[in-house]
Image (spheres, rainbow, N blue to C red):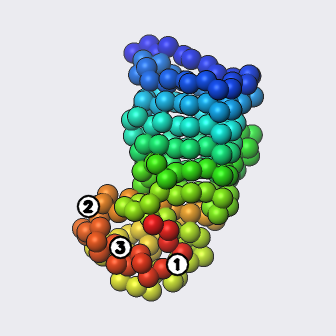
């Protein structure tokens, strides 16, 4: 299949609505691109969207198709942005160890709002989660997962969640500052129920829900 390549780079765009919805196109949000007060409508698979050193300020992302394992967010600078829709396995923030390209040095996130999004398996890397607003239940966010791993492993989690996910917190990258999960999806994956998750989650002040 021959894709139409659409480039946004080397400019500043303000107060515009960008519809990135054509599955026959590859969208490149490239270096020296700054978007302010823009709305970006995303309805393409991860492979159709490339973010490479762009800056987003006070923008809204409307994710109309679940975005899975999209790592390019860590090559973006996000400030004051809002997210809506479903994201799975996406990382945000500053994680220069992920790649040697200069764009990975520029990754950042602050003052962003995920309360209208549904996140599962998404992490905040190398940035202060205190400036962020996370989605409410049935999502839940583990703050400082590595530092609190010992405490979190001290209880019996439902199903296989403890032995798979909680035990794995020790092996998360050192820059992991927060991990957000979706209770119904995790419950289905690890033979438990959302209610069983909530009963445990309520015991910890390091979990936001």
Q: Quadrant of the N terminus?
A: top left
Residue 178's place in the image compared with 29, above or below, is below
Distance of label 3 from label 2 (alpha carbons): 14 Å
Residue on which disc 1 sits: 205
Q: Position of residue 2 (x, y in %)?
A: 44, 13
Picture residue at 54% right of the left edge, 75% below the top: 206
Q: Position of residue 125 (x, y in %)?
A: 62, 57
Distance of label 1 from label 3 (alpha carbons): 13 Å
Residue 28 shown left or right of residue 188 in the figure = right
Residue on which disc 3 sits: 198
Picture residue at 30% right of the left edge, 60% below the top: 184
Distance of label 1 from label 2 (alpha carbons): 25 Å
Between label 3 and label 2, give the one nearer the viewer. 3
Q: Residues within 10 Å of mark 1 (few under 14, many from 20)?
A: few
Picture residue at 52% right of the left edge, 44% below the top: 83
Mark 1 / mark 2, whichever is N-terminal: 2
Q: Residues within 10 Å of mark 3 (few under 14, many from 20)?
A: some
Q: Residues within 10 Å of mark 2 (few under 14, many from 20)?
A: few
Mark 3 / mark 2, whichever is N-terminal: 2
Q: Position of residue 63 (x, y in %)?
A: 45, 37
Residue 202 shown left or right of residue 97 in the figure = left
Q: Secondary structure at mark 3?
A: helix
Residue 167's place in the image compared with 101, above or below, is below
Q: Position of residue 181 (x, y in %)?
A: 43, 60
Q: Secondary structure at mark 2?
A: helix
């Amino acid at each position: 299949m021959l894709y139409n390549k659409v480039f946004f780079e080397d400019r500043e765009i303000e107060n515009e609505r960008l519809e990135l919805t054509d599955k026959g196109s590859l969208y490149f949000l490239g270096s020296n691109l700054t978007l302010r007060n823009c709305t970006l409508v995303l309805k393409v698979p991860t492979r159709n969207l490339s973010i490479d050193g762009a800056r987003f300020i006070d923008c809204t992302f409307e994710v109309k198709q679940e975005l899975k394992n999209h790592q390019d967010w860590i090559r973006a600078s996000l400030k004051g942005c809002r997210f809506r829709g479903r994201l799975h396995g996406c990382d945000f923030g500053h994680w220069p160890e992920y790649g040697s390209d200069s764009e990975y040095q520029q990754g950042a996130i602050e003052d962003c709002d995920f309360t209208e999004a549904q996140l599962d398996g998404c992490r905040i890397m190398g940035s202060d989660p205190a400036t962020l607003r996370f989605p409410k239940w049935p999502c839940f966010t583990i703050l400082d997962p590595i530092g609190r791993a010992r405490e979190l492993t001290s209880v019996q989690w439902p199903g296989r969640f403890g032995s798979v996910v909680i035990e794995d917190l020790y092996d998360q990258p050192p820059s992991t500052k927060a991990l957000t999960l979706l209770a119904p999806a995790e419950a289905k994956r690890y033979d438990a129920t959302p209610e069983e998750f909530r009963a445990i989650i309520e015991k910890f002040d390091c979990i936001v829900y």
